[in-house]
Amino acid sequence: MVTRRSLMKLTGLGGAVALLPAERAIAALMPTVTATPFSAPLPIPPVARPVRQTATTDFYNVAIGETTAEVFPGVRTKVFTYNGNFPAATIVARRGREVSVTHTNSLTAPTVAHLHGAHVAASSDGYPMDVINPGGSREYRYPNAQLGGTFWYHAHAHHTEAEQVYRGLAGFYLLKDDQETALGLPGGDYDVPLMVRDAHFDDAGQLVYVNGDFNARTTLLVNGKPQPYFQVAARKYRLRFVNGSNERAFRLKLADGSAMTLIGSDGGLLPAPITASSFDLWPGERVEVVVDFSRYAVGTKVVLGNDLGEVDSTKSVMRFDVVRTATDTSRVPSVLRALPNLGTATVTRDIQLKLDLSTGAFQFDGKVFDSTRVDQHIKLGTTEIWRITNADTAPAIPHNLHLHLVQFQVLDRAGVAVGGHETGLKDTVTVPPGATVRIKVRFDGFEGRYVYHCHMLDHSATGMMGQMEITR
């Protein structure tokens, strides 16, 4: 049964949690390790190096295990890692060149690796039941035939995906392509991956994981450090944001209100750059922005804030410190990349997301995930409209939907056309309480079984996941 307290944990909307004053006071007394904001430099994830290469393929070996990391000064925090890195190393791939990654599991529990956003064969998708048992290994092959974009790899074994990602099993996978390179966008040291997330630490500086524990996750991390600072030159930077949180949404903006240029979404570049003073970033989503720091004098410090933060520690994400001048030959052209033609839809499907208040299980269409049941039978090579409705209005609980295998276009939300980064290709879409979102998706390339699920991972871990079978 769902208790009164557990229900309150479920009702957060992008950072707002329905706690009574007395409960807020109790929560405030909970001992937690804290860090002075903007006291630690931003770590940049290392770039993974292949163990060998052939004419067509780059091969990587990844060891999955538990180790410690210095999240807070002088404190060793137990974390799960890929190859001992927290944050995980970034895999940089090229379009048209295959990547092979062999994961070996040294944890005490099974795990799965999913490349989020990738168009891959079912055998390499990271199906939640295709686990790597402790001591075992599994090879995943990624053809990288799709357009370039910011993707990420993370744990995906059913029921444990939320905790394993929370404890550190997540990393960037950047797919580059020649068309994008020719645009002249900021690159090299000026192309920066930023994984933002929240966490709950106890008084010894150890991660605490409790499903639905949103209200206690009041430490914000960027690339594994709490509210870091990043020294930048007075020039343009390409910032690749990924929301690696289990439940938290962000509304990111520069504290002085100055403009950012949105250039990319989940599926890569937008059709054209969009000027915005803020943007929303929900779990699993990626947004790429260009910020021109040349408008600031050397010595300026600019905070990246979160307008959805519910307490002081969740309202500031990181700080940019302008420390030097630099030559800048990069540019943001007026045309980036046209949207693909997804064809004419021949099928419309209705999907409902809802919490079962009697059991505490999050469900699709009144059912929890069952690997022996196919929820959607789909014909290869067809285009569909999915109408996704969030029926959780009492209590009001947000959800989002991630489809494996495919990128899609968001048509509208509550009948209103979307804007900002949602005008690009997406694989994860937000569905507010009571709203219906329509997406247009084409199923091409691969047959087999794939899942779709809420990417608020605390929800999918309790069953908010379905299975689609794609056949000829």
Image (spheres, rainbow, N blue to C red):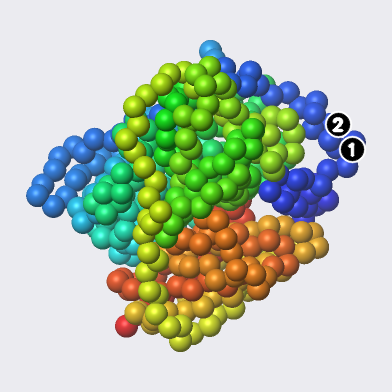
Residue type of the residue flagged with mark 2: Ala
Determine whether the residue tagged by mark 1 lies in a helix, strand or loop.
helix
- Identify the residue at horizontal 42%, vertical 30% (top origin): 235
The residue positioned farthest toward the bottom in the image shown = 346
Q: Is residue 159 left or right of residue 170?
A: right
Relative to 78, say whether 459 is above or below. Answer: below
Nearest to the observer: residue 196 or residue 354: 196
Above or below: residue 7 compared with residue 472 = above
Q: Which residue is mark 2?
A: 25
Q: Is the Cβ of the residue at disc 2 closer than 8 Å to that at disc 1?
A: yes
Q: For this rendering, which residue is in front, 463 or 302?
A: 302
Q: Where is residue 453? Give x, y as percent.
A: 53, 62
The numbered dot on residue 21 is 1
The numbered dot on residue 352 is none
Give the class, few, some or many, for how many residues have Cα within 10 Å of label 1's Cα (few <14, many ≥20): few
Mark 1 residue type: Pro
Quadrant in the rendering for residue 218: top right
Q: Is residue 318 left or right of residue 289?
A: right
Locate residue 259: give its quadrant.
top right
Q: Is residue 261 visible?
A: yes
Residue at the limit of the structure toward the top, as seen here: 74
Q: In the rendered view of the protein, which quadrant contains the N terminus?
A: bottom right
Asked whether, in this view, residue 348 is left or right of residue 436, the answer is left
